[in-house]
Image (tube, rainbow, N blue to C red):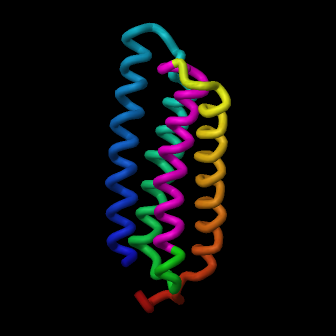
């Protein structure tokens, strides 16, 4: 289970890394920094954090497989929700209702916050050294 989640989180982080670098390249080429907060969150939460969680699950044995699954799904959903929500809220690409975009942004961020809290719990449920 852990190896599956390790690889899944690392693959998702690679996708976020590609999206983040494409956004950075676009901003540099266009000379516009409108995407700066979205770019930063995609790289920090999507690429760096998900990669670190994937490595953690590869290195440490955790006693709670269902918790790993729940933490992994909240990480993926929250990272996507936060990033898309920021994009909808700040750049208003489709003239979407402002209340909808704000709720999307807040819900995505809250789900991601839950994921971080679950990860804290997961770190206390690791097996002793040598039991992996």
Q: Residue at x 40, y 25 (%)?
A: 23
Q: Nearer the viewer, residue 54 or 100?
A: 100
**106 lies left or right of 26:** right
- Residue 76 location (% of width, % of height): 46, 54
Q: Give the answer, above or below, for where 41 lies relative to 9.
A: above
How far across and down, in percent of the image, does residue 58 sit?
Answer: 39, 71
Between 7 and 82, the residue placed more toward the observer is 82
Residue drawn 46% across and 77% down?
60
Q: Height in image: 109 above or below 128?
A: above
Q: How many marks?
A: 0
Give the farthest residue toward the top.
31
Classify 33 as above or below 19: above
Q: Estimate the x, y position of residue 4 in percent, counting from the top left.
A: 33, 71
Q: Main secondary structure of the magenta part?
A: helix
| Residue under the image location 48 percent in, 44 percent down | 80
Q: Is residue 89 magenta?
A: yes
Residue at the extreme bottom of the image, as rendered: 131
Q: Residue at x 37, y 21 (%)?
A: 25
On the picture, is 31 further left or further right than 15? right
Q: Quadrant of the N terminus?
A: bottom left
| Foreground of the two, 67 or 107 | 107
Q: Is residue 69 magenta?
A: yes
Question: What are the residue bounds of the magenta stretch?
Answer: 68-94
Residue 71, position as x, y percentages in the image: 53, 66
């Amino acid at each position: 289970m852990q190896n599956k989640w390790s690889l899944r989180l690392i693959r998702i982080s690679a996708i976020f890394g590609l999206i983040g670098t494409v956004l950075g390249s676009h901003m540099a080429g266009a000379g516009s920094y409108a995407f700066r907060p979205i770019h930063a969150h995609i790289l920090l939460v999507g690429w760096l954090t998900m990669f670190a969680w994937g490595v953690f699950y590869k290195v440490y044995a955790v006693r709670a497989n269902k918790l790993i699954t729940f933490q992994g799904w909240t990480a993926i959903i929250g990272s996507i929700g936060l990033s898309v929500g920021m994009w909808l809220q700040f750049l208003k690409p489709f003239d979407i209702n402002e209340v909808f975009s704000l709720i999307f942004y807040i819900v995505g961020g809250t789900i991601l916050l839950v994921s971080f809290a679950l990860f804290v719990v997961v770190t206390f449920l690791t097996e002793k050294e040598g039991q992996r």
